[in-house]
Amino acid sequence: MSAPPVCPICGARVPPHARACPDCGSDEHTGWSAAAYEPRPDGISDEEFDYAEFVQREFGNGQKPKTHPWKFTAACIVFLIILALVLLLLP
C-alpha cells in the first residue's frame, strides 16, 4: 500500500513514496493499512461506545475506600514505645 498524502493518524503531510509518517512514525503496519480501520473487536461501533459506562466499569464509582487513620496512629504509638524501650535498655 502506498503512503497517503495526509497521515490518517496525526494529519501531517506525507511525502510521496514515504514508508512512514515523518511526524508520528505511523506506517502501513500501524495506521495506513485497511486493518487499522476494521471494526472494533468487541463489535461496538464508535457511535455506540458509551465512555461513561466504560469508565464506570473500569474504575468503579469514583469513591475512595474508607480509611482507618486510627490504625496508623496506633501503629505509630506502638512503634515509638518500642523504640523508647530499646533506647532506654541499651547500655
Image (tube, helix red, strand yellow):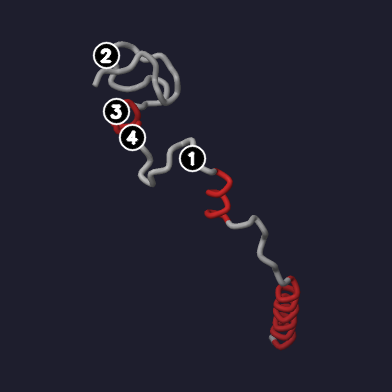
Q: Amino acid at mark 3?
A: Ser
Q: Quadrant of the N terminus?
A: top left
78 relative position to 36: left or right? right
Assign a secondary structure to mark 2: loop
Q: CA distance from mark 2 to mark 3?
A: 15 Å
Residue 72 sits above or below residue 81 on the image: above
The residue lying at 72 percent from left, 75 percent from top is 76
- Camera-nearest residue between 24 and 40: 40
Residue farthest along the top direction in this orientation: 16
Q: Which residue is identified by label 1?
A: 48
Q: Quadrant of the C terminus?
A: bottom right
Q: Which residue is identified by label 4?
A: 38
Q: Which residue is identified by label 2?
A: 17
Q: Amino acid at mark 1?
A: Glu
- Camera-nearest residue between 68 and 60: 60
Q: CA distance from mark 1 to mark 3?
A: 24 Å
Q: Position of residue 30 (x, y in %)?
A: 33, 32
The residue lying at 30 percent from left, 11 percent from top is 16
- Camera-nearest residue between 13 and 79: 13
Q: Are marks 3 and 4 in contact (CB under 8 Å)?
A: no
58 relative position to 81: left or right? left
24 relative position to 1: left or right? right
Q: Earlier in the sequence, mark 1 or mark 2?
A: 2
Assign a secondary structure to mark 3: loop
Q: Earlier in the sequence, mark 2 or mark 3?
A: 2
Residue 28 sits above or below residue 14 on the image: below
The residue lying at 35 percent from left, 44 percent from top is 41
- Camera-nearest residue between 60 and 46: 46
Judged by depth in the image, the label closer to the viewer, 4 or 2, is: 4
Residue 46 sits above or below residue 52 on the image: above
Q: Position of residue 61 (x, y in %)?
A: 63, 57
